[in-house]
Image (spheres, rainbow, N blue to C red):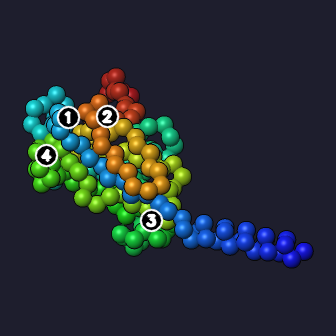
Amino acid sequence: MKKLALFAMVWCLSLLSSEAMAQGFNMNFGYFTPNAPLVTTCGGATGLPDGRLVKIFQDVDNDGPDLTDPQPLVCSDPPDCVTPFDAVNIDHFFTNGVEVGEGPGYFATLEALTCGSTVPANARYYLRIYEADNTTVLWTSTVVTAVMGYQEANFAAADWTCGASGPQCTVIDETE
C-alpha cells in the first residue's frame, strides 16, 4: 500500500511540475534578400517603405488565410504573457527593411511573437501587409506553424500573394 501511495504522490508531482514547466514559443518573422523586395503595387517596382502595417493572423480553422481568421489574442501583461493562458504578446508590427539594413520591401521582427505559457491549439499564423491606408491588404503570406521553443519564419518570395486573399465577391452587375 505504501508503494501505491508513493507512486500516486510521484505521479501527481510529475503532473504539477510539467504544468509549471509548460513552455510556449518565440517566433521571429522575416523577409530578406536575395528574395525580390515586396512592392507597393502588384507587379510594381517600388519596394515597400518602412512603416507599413503588418498584422499577424491566426488560422484557427486550418484552411489557410481567409476573411474569417482573427488576429491572435494579445495578453494582458506583455511581454511576459502569462494571462490569458494561450495569448501572445503582439498582433502586429511594421515593415522595417531600411532600418535592419535590407532595404525597402524587406522586414525583420525586432520583437518575437511570443506565448510564454503554452503553444496554443491551432498555433498557425500568417501575415498581412497593408497599403498606406492601413485598411487595404496588399500582401498575404503563407501559414507557418509555431512549435515549442524558438523558431524563425523566414519567408521566400513564393510565400506571398499580392492583393486581398481569401474568398472574394465577384459582382456581375449592380442588381446583385
Please rate how many residues cluster around mark 4, counting C-alpha atoms within 10 Å: few if below 14, some from 14 to 19, many from 20: some
**Percent position (x, y) of residue 17?**
61, 71
Neighbours of disc 1 within 10 Å: few (<14), some (14-19), many (20+): few
Picture residue at 34% right of the left edge, 22% below the top? 172
Give the residue at mark 4: 102
Q: Residue type at mark 3: give it.
A: Gly
What residue do we see at 34% from left, 45% from top?
153
CA separation, marks 4 and 2? 18 Å
Label 1, label 3: how far apart the Cα atoms are: 32 Å
User: In the structure shown, which secondary structural element does the residue marked by tag 3 occupy?
Assistant: loop
Circle nearer the N terminus (3, 2): 3
Q: Is residue 42 left or right of residue 112?
A: left
Q: Secondary structure at mark 4?
A: loop
Furthest toward the right, the residue is 1
Callouts 4 and 1 close, C-beta under 8 Å = no
Residue under label 3, please give it: 116
Instruction: Determine the residue positioned at 10% across, 45% down.
Output: 103
Which mark sits nearer the N-terminus, 2 or 1?
1
Q: Alpha-carbon neighbours of circle 2 within 10 Å: few (<14), some, or many (≥20)?
A: few
Query: Picture coordinates of residue 30 (x, y %)?
Result: 26, 47
Q: How many marks?
A: 4
Mark 2 is on which residue type?
Asp
Position of 19 relative to 126 (above/below): below
Q: Amino acid at mark 4?
A: Glu
The quarter in which the C terminus is drawn is: top left
What distance separates the C-alpha of mark 3 from that of mark 4?
30 Å
Residue reaching furthest to the front: 3
Element under disc 2: helix
- The residue carrying mark 2 is 159
At label 1, the amino acid type is: Asn
Where residue 12 sits, quadrant-wise, is bottom right
Tag 1 residue: 35
